[in-house]
Image (tube, rainbow, N blue to C red):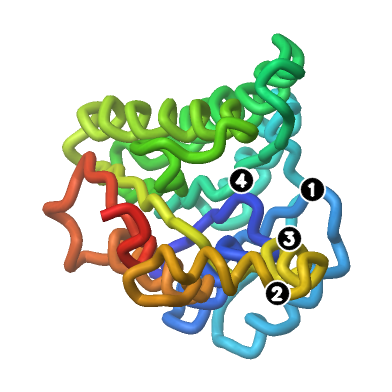
Amino acid sequence: MRKTVLVTGSSKGIGAACIRKFASNGYNVVITYKDDYERANKLKEEVDKFDIKSMIVHLDLSDDKEIEEVVSKIIDSFGGIDILVNNVGIEESSDFFDKSKESFTRIFNVNVYGTFLITKMVIKSMINTGGSIINISSNNSTVAGDINTLEYDMSKASINIFTKDLAKLSPNINVNAVLPGWVLTEKIDELNKSLDGKLVEEESKNIALNRFAKPEEIANVVYFLASDEAKYINGELITIDGGYKI
């Protein structure tokens, strides 16, 4: 029986790369999006060439009711969820003295509480049958990042301890996190172009491998952590930043 993987925030970037990786290896996949249905549908058309079953669902991690409805819909359609990749993470940038309770609430409500709630819903379906959960954190969660993105960095640090605590919940479920550094996603590509290529040029100098990661390189590690070969890896935080912060 084919396994089913749910990747949150998977219409583009790292999430989309994860969908492609799993689908190309025979997994049923669930693509979620919040704003860009067209991109999600294009991705579905792309992976449907493989002999798998795919689904697109709208998912807003700030909406408790929608989270519960989405998980129930997926379980009804696929019979369960074997792998959950918590990829959604929103970010804001502002001056330290402009930050407020509201800015922290917006970020933590999605990145921390939303991730917790969807994980809680999914685990109910996998706790007896077994499964894997991979959380997408950030290398800024373990060492100093940018003070302007403090809320995001703190939320990802929360995901790290969530990963370790959750890893003790059940011997049937592996829970790990990957901590990417700079990744050349669509968002970063657009930002780089707006800065005349200076972002990639300057930041690459700080990376031992002298380049940004491709989304596929993050997806490869996620795929491995979900595989049988990684069954004895549990509660780990795996940094993938090309040597940016060694």
Q: Nearer the viewer, mark 1 or mark 2?
A: 2
Residue 88, disc: 4
Q: Quadrant of residue 140?
A: top left
Could you tell me which secondary element the residue under label 1 belongs to?
Answer: loop
Q: Quadrant of the N terminus?
A: bottom left
Kind of residue indicated by mark 4: Val
Front-most of residues 93 and 156: 93
Q: Nearer the viewer, mark 3 or mark 1?
A: 1
Kind of residue indicated by mark 1: Lys
Are the residues tagged 1 and 4 within 8 Å (C-beta)? yes
Residue 34, disc: 1
Going from the N terminus, do you reach mark 3 or mark 1 first? 1
Residue 197, disc: 2
Q: Residue at x 23, y 44 (%)?
A: 236
Q: Quadrant of residue 143?
A: top left
Label 2 crowd bin: few (<14), some (14–19), many (20+), radius 10 Å = few
Q: Nearer the viewer, mark 2 or mark 3?
A: 2
Give the alpha-carbon distance from disc 3 to disc 1, as whole Å: 11 Å
Give the alpha-carbon distance from disc 2 to disc 4, as whole Å: 26 Å
Residue corresponding to mark 3? 56
Relative to 181, is 61 above or below? above
Q: Is residue 129 left or right of residue 90?
A: left
Front-most of residues 179 and 205: 205
Q: Is residue 141 left or right of residue 95?
A: left
Going from the N terminus, do you reach mark 2 or mark 3 first? 3
Front-most of residues 90 and 153: 153
Q: Quadrant of the C terminus?
A: bottom left
